[in-house]
Each structure stands twice: as C-alpha cells, then as structure tokens.
Image: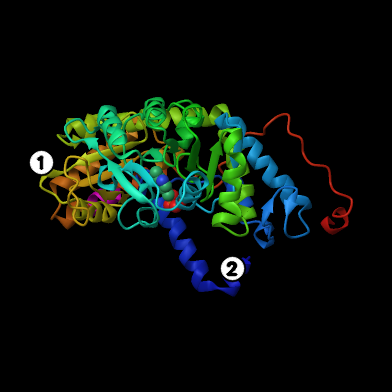
Amino acid sequence: MATALERYDPQIYELIRQEKARQSACVRLIPSENYVSRAVMEANGSCLTNKYSEGYPGKRYYEGQQVTDLVETIARERAKKIFKADHANVQPYSGSVANIAAYMALINPGDTIMGLSLPHGGHLTHGWKVSVTSKVFNSVRYTVDPNTGRLDYNQIEDLAKKYKPRIIISGATAYPREIDFEAFGQIAKKVGAYHVSDIAHIAGLVVAGMHKNPVPYTDIVSTTTHKTLRGPRGGMLLCKAEHADKVDKSVFPGMQGGPHMNTIAAIAVALAEADTPEFIAYARQIVKNAKALAEKLLEYGFNLSSGGTDNHLILIDLRNKNVPGKKLAKALDRAKIETNYNTTPMAPDHPANPSGLRLGTPSVTTRGMKEDQMHLIAGFINKVVENIDNEAVIEDVSKEVLLLSSQFPVPEHFIIPNRDNQDVPQPMDTLTPWLF
Ligand SMILES: *Cc1c(COP(=O)(O)O)cnc(C)c1O
C-alpha cells in the first residue's frame, strides 16, 4: 500500500527513497555522520513536531504541556546521568547554536574567545573568520603543532597568557587524538578564563568511556547529538549547577524560540540507547575500526596527521600521493565511498583546495563492520588513489564496495534490546479518551 507521502508528494517520496538507497549502497566514512535507530527515527517523526513549548518544563508560555514537560524532563535527566553533569539543556537546535548560546551565557559581545583554528581542526563556531563568532567576539586562535599534528599545551598556555581570553574553547571537528580537557581547564584557571568544551564529534566515545569526559574540567560542555552519539540532528549543553540558570536563559529566550519537541524526544531515545552495554561495545568498535583503517592506510604509504588515531577519525595528508583532496573525494564518491576533503595541520593554507582527506568509522561500525572490512576499505581507497584517472578501475571498485555494503545492511530495524526498570508514564485522565 502506498504511504501518505508517496501519494501526496511523489517527488519528495522518490527523492527520500533514493537517498535511503544511496545511504545503504555507500560505505559512509564521513566522521560526523551516522545511522540512527528505528526508535529514534519514530520519535523524530512524531506528532511532537506539532507542539509549541517555549520555556522549560513547568515554566512554559503556551498551554497543553502535559506531555512535553515529561518528555523534556526525561531527556534532561538521561543526559545528566550519562554525562555525569549537574545540569543539561536539550533545546539547542544544533551544535552551532549550542556553541553561541554557551558563549553568550558566560561573556559579552566584544570579549575575547580563543579556539582551535579551522584549518587545524577547529569548528567554524570556535571563532573562525567567516563565522558570526569572530564578528561578535574578538577571536584569537591556537593551532596544533604542524610537526606532530598534536595540540601543544605550552603554546596554548602562552597564547592564553598573551591574549587573556574570557573563554578558552577545547574540542575539534578534525582532530584524531585524545584531547586533554584537564590541561585546558588548568590553563583557563591560570588566566581567569572560562572553559567551554565542544565534544560534538566524540560525545558517544565520552559516554562509553573511550574518551575522557570533560564535564569535571569545564564550565560548559557543548555537543551535537547526531554524530558518534547516534541521535537525531540536535544540540545539547551540559554544565555545573552554578551556570544552569545562565545557560537556560541563553538558549531561551536568548538564542531561540520554541524547542523542537520531536527532536528532544528522539534525543531522549538516543540517550537511553547510549546508556547500554551494547552502545559501549559499539563505541569500542568505532575506535578499533579507526585504528585498523589507519594501520592499513599506513601500510599503503599514506601519511596520517599525528601518525594515527585515538578516536573515530583519521586525517590523511595526501601530498606524497600527488592527488588533491577534492579530486580524491570526488573519485571516491564515484566508487561509492563517502569522505570529505579537508585541510591538514601540515598544510593548513589552502582551504579551497586542501591536500587532506578526513575519514571516520561511526557509520560503518553501526552497520556491523569490523577490522577485516576496514582493511578492505583501505585497499579500495588505495586502489582509487593509484588509479585516480582511470574511470574503469574506479567503476570496478564501486562494484566491490556495493558487494561489501550488501553484506552489512543498514540497520533499518536497529532495535536496542528492551530496557528494564522503566517508569512508563500512566495515562493522563484528560488525554486517555483521545487515545482510543
Ligand atoms: C559538527 C560540529 C559542530 C556543529 O554542529 P551543527 O549541528 O552542524 O551546527 C560544532 N562543533 C563541532 C566541534 C562540530 O564537529
């Protein structure tokens, strides 16, 4: 039977169908992407999208919040539990907005922020030139050591002493090594700065204990919910009790209007999924897979930023292979391997035509791939690099990729086993009649 979407809007229906097929056929190595579970998808596509809930549980500006108050409270409690935080705000529409709300909670326009430079792995919203964060705030940037590909905490401390930022931002969008959040916290203390940590990429690894949790060493932790955490597209702020009120006011009414309650419900589901032994095993496998992929790429003579990885992400410096990043990313896309071209700390100067490629293992790990498949994928990448101008070979690789993908179906019906000890809300008298 045709779905409502198929009947009413066959164009969009067909495009979604094609995207689903594409996500199923491709080996997706973009480190910020994932596949959510069926349960998350259902919550995200629910009637909660119909509801306006400006404010917070118990303090709303619209009536009819019997259900939404409970949903948001559950999401907040789950976030607090798994990140061991005093307070959680689950309303930010996405990571970028969460970051700006975090800064505005602590400092004023014109104050100085200090974050990792974008070509060295920082995010736009860490004060990069084209971002509003460098226009509203005075932005100074630290870099990674181009020789080691690693953060140099002495250099960061020296810069902090020189520029006296009011906020130091730790966290990255393209950094393959563990970040020493404690060291950042100490530097911030020394110069009287706040410490905001952005764990958008690694939130799932943090929950699973595969990366140190920054919460004890920071004023505010900002994250997305859709990367390694494997939830819907959204953002979240975690903080100590002393900042709770400021953070909430900064998100609403400071930055946003009504929260997206369907997203918040889906975040709640993803947080429950993340609080399971299965998720910890998943996060472990993400790192094992990244290491396996990195080792094989090294064997094929690829140069990796920092020489390898501690997390879910790999940054290849392609200069010794004489293939530009963009050209390779496009050839790999034709071979059904999705990646993105990126600058590397060794050659940060050409963001328009970068010499790097960024890879990550969260999506392929969700599909159940393990080390053996990573070795195959490294071989595919090498074959495309060595035959970059040979379309017939690239076509052959795409067939091998399809064969691999077909053995690891997208978890359409990805269901985490039933959870015990749940307090399922009792039906509310006023609402019950509508349910039948
Ligand atoms: C992805 C990312 C963001 C932004 O998230 P959006 O949801 O795309 O706005 C912020 N910070 C870091 C470090 C990221 O990797």
Q: Which mark is residue 5?
A: 2
Q: Position of residue 369 (x, y in %)?
A: 40, 36
Residue displayed at 42% across by 42% down: 363
Residue marked by disc 1: 320
In front: mark 1 or mark 2? Answer: 1
Q: Quadrant of the C terminus?
A: bottom right
Residue 253 or residue 372, whichever sits in front: 253
Residue displayed at 50% across by 69% down: 12
CA–CA distance in space, label 1 to label 2: 49 Å
Judge whether residue 397 is colored magenta.
Answer: yes
Relative side of 197 to 326, left or right: right
Badge 1 residue CB within 8 Å of ligand 1: no
Instruction: Give the residue type that dot 1 points to.
Output: Asn
Instruction: Give the residue type that dot 2 points to.
Output: Leu
Q: Secondary structure at mark 2?
A: helix
**In terms of secondary structure, what is the magenta stretch mainly?**
helix
Q: Earlier in the sequence, mark 1 or mark 2?
A: 2
Residue range of the region highlighted in magenta in the rendering: 395-399
